[in-house]
Every structure is written in structure tokens, then in C-alpha cells.
Image: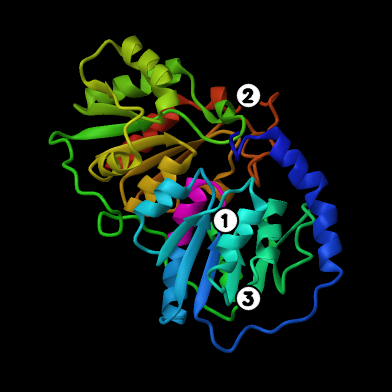
Amino acid sequence: MNERGSILLKFLDKYLGIPLLFFLGCFKFSRKIPAEIKTIALLKTAAIGDTVLLTGIVKDLKKAYPSAKIILFTGGSNFIFAKLLKDFDRVEKLPIKNILKSTRMLREYKIDLLLDFGAWPRINALFSYLSGARYLIGFNTRGQYRHYIYDSTVNHSDQIHEIENYRNILRALNLAPHHNPSVSPENVSYQLASPGSPYVVCHLSAGGEKSYLKELSINQWSEVCRDLFEMGLKIYLTGAAADFEKNEKLRLALNCMAVENVAGIDLAKTLQLLSGAKYVISVNTGIMHIASCMGVKTIGIHGPTSIKRWGPIGSNSVSVATRNPKGQYLNLGFEYQEKIPCMQDVQVKDIQMALRQASN
């Protein structure tokens, strides 16, 4: 069962999680931040893009607590990427559907401070409560009813980028966070050769629930790619193994030797490919955030996803948004409105303009 897209898990998370957390919160007593902090746990059980943002947060924590051990607890969807990073002292994958085993894993580390970066999942809050950590900080998100068990809560805002919500958790510790997220060959564990000629990476597929609502059509991508050919660039089409067939439709439609479908290569090789690209053009998904935080010239394409909340934040990034005035409505990532055709209202000429802007 896919953790991110499982309807059953989300049903249980909401209708069992909310009353359970409220009940547990009734017995919560006031605690202070420990005077000595030896072990800090970060909890982020899904989403590669969100995990990218944590690379800035962990740098701030290491500066504030240089002798503390920092552990990232992930779920299945972000574990492989997190393991490639060198920012954390340890990365552990929680078996989300096995609460007893997850609890044992968390308690093994005798956590002094646990920071929960989940904005809405009640299961994160339950894991936080069961972790045995001496102090808990998490989000109070409007309408999610998950905040009852934390020692300190941070109001999750839909008016700021998610990196600022994350930084607000650190501000609850009286820290002044300032490090930007970054992913580089120095903190990713791979050593592979990049293609020699100039190339662009195009990432067609999004992740998570109803991901198709964040994707362009083959016709739209065909127009974009023909413009790239005129610039003398080879094109690599990335994605998971499940995206190979979709990428192949575009490759065949282009009928050109300068396109290579590499969907299904492992994540380490994909990161190597991103790091050497002249440009990365991607729908709003984890690959977009990785490329942006690598410093690669990145064009992020947004339909239902809000640029203000989830746009790429690298200095070389450019965002292209749907022209549908009702678009960019996603806040937490699941509030899809299928009747709003956001991606078909993304104009190819806007992507072409963004490419010219990135070329300057």
C-alpha cells in the first residue's frame, strides 16, 4: 500500500487520529525544554521536496547544538533520497503501518528534542507522542486537529513558503534560522560521470495523490522540447520506472535522436544527471526542488500548486504558472479541485520566456 496515496490510511489518520490525539492531549502536562540536548529527532514521513527543505534546517540546528546527534526519521517515499544526504548524523525509515515497531525505533534513541515537520498527518503527532522524547514541537494547522500532544506548537501558515513554516519551528527554540536548503555533490554520496555535451533535463511526472493534475500534456512538452533542440541541447527525460511509458510517448512523438528516456535509473544517477544539466525543466515535484537547491538553472511549472507556498527557492530558479486565475490553490497538497484545468492553461510561450530569462 502506498503511504502517500492510500485512501484507507488517510481515512484512519483523520477519523481515528483526531479523537485519539485529543484524548491523549487531555493528560499532557507542562514540560520545559531540556537544559542539555544530546539527541535531536526530525520527523518527516513523506515527500522528497519537503526533505530538501530540511537540509537548511539541519544546518541551523548543527550551529545551535554542535554536540547534539541529529536523526531524521522518514517514511518510505523520502527515505532513499534522505540516505543520499550527508547532512544528518543518521537516517531511519519508520514502518508507518506498524506503530509498535515505529515506537520501538524512536524510543531506542532516547530523544531529548523531537521536531515534527508534518503539517497535517495525525500519525506524525502520534509517533511524536509515543517517541518518549523529553520535549515535542509541532504544527498547529488550521482544521487538522493534531496539535494537542505537543509541548510547544507553531501555527502553520498558508501565507508563507513552507521553508518559513519550518524555520518557525526553530524560532520556537529562540533560534535565528538563516541557512538555505542546499543539495550538492559534496553532501550526496555518489561518484558518477556526467554526459559531456550540453543537455537539459525534463521531468514530466509529479508525485503523490492525483499527481496527473500537476502534469503537462505530451503536446505541450513537444513544443517545449522543439525549442530546446533549436538551442542545440540534448534532452534527458527523467522519472521513476512507472513513468517510462509516458516519457517514451514524448520521445517517439519528437522522433529525434537527441532525446533519451532515462526513467527508472536510480536516484543517485538522477541527481548526478541534474547536477550537470544546463537547465532542468520540471513540474512541481521533488526533482524540481532538488535541482533548484543544487543551484542548477531550474524552470518550475505550476498549475494547482501555489508558487508562494511551494515554489523553487534556489537563486537560479524561475517559476511558470498557469494562467487560470483559479489555479495555484494547493496549500497542504491534497485540496485538489479536478474541475479547474490548471495545467492546460500553462502557456508554452511562458516556459520559453522563462528559458530565455534563465539563459541571461
Front tag of 2 and 3:
3
Density class for disc 2 (Cα within 10 Å; few <14, some 14-19, many ≥20) is some
Q: Main secondary structure of the magenta part?
A: helix
Residue matched to label 1: 162
From the viewer's perspective, tell me whether residue 163 is left or right of residue 153: left
For the residue pair 153 and 148, the one nearer the viewer reads as 148
* Residue 229 pos. (x, y %): 24, 22
Vertical placement of residue 332 versus 303, above or below? below
Residue at left 41%, top 81%?
Answer: 66
As drawn, is 31 to the left or to the right of 166? right
Q: Is residue 160 depicted above or below 174 in this figure?
A: above
Give the quadrant of the C terminus. Answer: top left
Q: Amino acid at mark 1?
A: Glu
Residue, disc 3: 172
Q: Are marks 2 and 1 in contact (CB under 8 Å)?
A: no
- First in residue order: circle 2 vs circle 1: 1
- Depth order, front residue of 36/277: 36
**Closer to the N terminus: mark 1 or mark 3?**
1
- Amino acid type at image mark 3: Ala
Q: Which residues are magenta?
A: 44-55
Q: Is disc 2 placed on a helix, strand or loop?
A: loop
The location of residue 152, given as percent across then percent down, is 70, 73
Residue found farthest to the left: 196
Separation (CA) of disc 2 from disc 1:
25 Å
Q: Which residue is mark 2?
A: 341
